[in-house]
Amino acid sequence: MSRLTITLSEARYRALKEASARRDKTIGQLIDESLEYYGIKTLENAQSIVERARRHSGLSEARAMALATEEVKAARKR
C-alpha cells in the first residue's frame, strides 16, 4: 500500500480526526471511502465497468466510454 502526505488546516485535520473516531475508522479508511464515493477508480476498474455496461447495453466501445465519461462528470458535479 502506498503512503501519501497531505497538508490540511488544523480545523480540517481535527474534523477529520473526530469523524474517524466517531465512525471507529482510520483517517485512511475515511479518505479511501470518500474517493470511492466520488468515483475515483483505477483505470482497470473503470474499464471493467464500461465493458460490463457495453455488453449489457449493446453500445459500441466508443459510445459506452463516452456515456461513462458523461455520467462520471455529472456525478462529480453533485
Image (cartoon, rainbow, N blue to C red):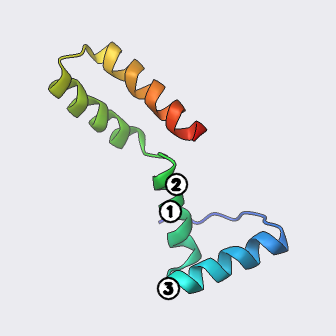
Q: What element does badge 1 sit on?
A: helix
Percent from the top left, x then y, of residue 8? Answer: 78, 66
| Residue beneath disc 3 | 24
Residue at figure coordinates x 78%, y 64% from the top left = 7
Relative to 27, residue 56 above or below: above
Disc on the earlier residue, 3 or 1? 3
- Quick one: which residue is furthest to the right in this view? 10
> Which mark identifies residue 13?
none
Q: Residue at x 57, y 41 (%)?
A: 78
Q: Give above or below for 71 relative to 75.
A: above
The reply to whether residue 2 is in sight is no
Residue marked by disc 1: 32
Q: Which residue is mark 2?
A: 35
* Left or right, 66 with reference to 18: left
Q: Residues within 10 Å of mark 1 (few under 14, many from 20)?
A: few
Q: Report the residue at 60% width, 37% height from top.
A: 77
**Is label 2 in a helix, a strand or a loop?**
helix
| Residue 41 vertical placement versus 65 (above, below) | below
Which mark lies nearer to you, 3 or 1?
A: 3
